[in-house]
Image (cartoon, rainbow, N blue to C red):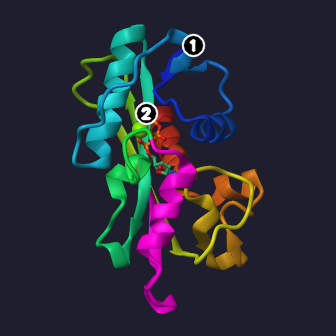
């Protein structure tokens, strides 16, 4: 099997994707000096395709991309596709999370429902007209303060009802078994196996 480029610059995502797929032919785009594209899409799927196409074109290889984010009901679905730049372009995870907690300060406990969404795309080559697409959704609630050290991004404020802890308090394997990303990757793998 030939290599597949993983079109992400997010170390947390890359760690999770590699742990789930366990395929040493999947190489992060940093190994090819891919320049990250602007994520101009209005939807997760558009942004995933933009990222996968950019990496596939640069590397002349098949590519996988993950576009994901947090949709909070009390904020009308925000931060959504702009989750990575909620507090501004190039904002840190901490700055994004602080902004979310601030926006949610006066939202009562009963109205703090949210979900993580992940769209994974596989392109056979840059101009592949029929991308393989898979999606995962993980329901949770937004905490009032950050707790936990694992994961990345908004994990410290995402309450996982089933385990009564934040997703940053889950062991990495358990997060991958439950998460939007784990769901999307398993669905993507099934489709790839059927090709
Ligand atoms: O499991 C997760 N646990 C916590 N936070 C998460 C998760 N999954 C996505 N998120 C947040 C992080 C970031 O704020 C945004 C993704 O933005 P997104 O553009 O897809 O990724 P990114 O810019 O970090 O890396 P890249 O585009 O190179 O893959 O959603
Ligand atoms: Mg991004």
Please state the extent of the stretch shown in magenta in the rendering.
Answer: 91-118
Q: Quadrant of the N terminus?
A: top right
Q: Residue 8 at x, y = what percent?
A: 49, 30
Residue at x 24%, y 18% (from the top left corner): 127
Residue at x 53%, y 73% (from the top left corner): 140
Residue 1 visible, this orientation: no
Q: Foreground residue, 107 or 50?
A: 107
| Residue 21 in the figure: left or right of residue 2 | right
| Residue 37 in the figure: left or right of residue 171 | left
Q: How many marks?
A: 2
Q: Is mark 2 within 8 Å of ligand 1?
A: yes
38 up-or-down from 55: above or below: below
Q: Foreground residue, 143 or 127?
A: 143
Q: CA distance from mark 1 to mark 2?
A: 15 Å
Q: Going from the N terminus, do you reach mark 1 or mark 2 first?
A: 1
Instruction: Tell me if mark 1 has few (under 14), some (14-19) or many (20+) residues whose alpha carbon lies within 10 angstroms of its own.
Output: few
Mark carried by residue 31: 1
Q: Foreground residue, 166 or 62?
A: 166
Label 2 belongs to which residue?
65
Find out whether residue 34 is within the magenta segment.
no
Residue at x 43%, y 12% (from the top left corner): 61
Q: Residue 51 at x, y = what percent?
A: 36, 29
Residue 68 visible, this orientation: yes
Residue at x 61%, y 73% (from the top left corner): 159
């Amino acid at each position: 099997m030939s290599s597949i480029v993983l079109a992400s610059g997010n170390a947390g995502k890359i760690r999770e994707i590699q742990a789930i797929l366990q395929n040493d032919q999947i190489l992060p785009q940093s190994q090819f000096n891919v320049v990250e594209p602007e994520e101009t899409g209005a939807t997760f799927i558009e942004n995933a395709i933009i990222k996968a196409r950019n990496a596939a074109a640069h590397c002349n290889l098949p590519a996988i991309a993950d576009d994901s984010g947090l949709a909070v009901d009390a904020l009308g679905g925000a931060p959504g596709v702009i989750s990575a730049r909620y507090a501004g372009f190039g904002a840190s995870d901490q700055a994004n999370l602080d902004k979310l907690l601030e926006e949610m300060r006066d939202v009562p406990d009963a109205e703090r429902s949210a979900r993580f969404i992940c769209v994974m795309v596989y392109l056979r080559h840059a101009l592949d007209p029929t991308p393989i697409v898979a999606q995962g959704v993980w329901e949770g609630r937004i905490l009032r303060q950050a707790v936990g050290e694992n994961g990345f991004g908004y994990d410290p404020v995402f309450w996982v009802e089933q385990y009564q802890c934040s997703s940053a308090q889950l062991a990495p394997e358990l997060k991958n078994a439950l998460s939007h990303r784990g769901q999307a990757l398993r669905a993507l793998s099934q489709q790839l196996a059927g090709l």
